[in-house]
Image (tube, rainbow, N blue to C red):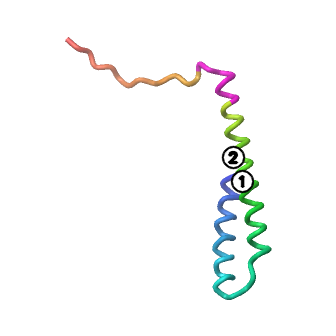
Amino acid sequence: EIERMRHQISRQRKDIQSLQRAGISTLPAEALLARMQATVDNLCAERDKRVGEQRMKSPGTSKVIKGSQLRQR
């Protein structure tokens, strides 16, 4: 969902720039874009919060995986 919205925001930014070059007012479109960006930011914050909570619930899953060990003689 987040990636889809980011792609949509990018497309709409390009459309707004085209309208600005044509001299058309873009205030309503910019307001919509700002609301969409805020929604994406909130979704990212919620995702990061849930990932953090998940890590706290299962602390054994963040182990470092070591590669092959060289034996010293």
Residue extent of the magenta highlight: 53-60
Q: Which residue is mark 2?
A: 44
Residue 11 to residue 21: above or below: above
Q: Quadrant of residue 25?
A: bottom right
Residue 6 to residue 49: above or below: below
Whether residues under marks 1 and 2 lie with C-beta atoms below 8 angstroms apart, the answer is yes
Magenta span: chief secondary structure? helix
Q: Amino acid at mark 2?
A: Cys
Residue 32 to residue 27: above or below: above
Q: Residue furthest bottom?
A: 22
Residue 20: % across, % down: 67, 82
Q: Residue at x 28, y 19 (%)?
A: 70
Residue 22: % across, % down: 67, 88
Dot 1 alpha-carbon crowd within 10 angstroms: few under 14, some 14 to 19, many 20 or more:
some
Q: Residue at x 64, y 27 (%)?
A: 55
Residue 64: % across, % down: 48, 24
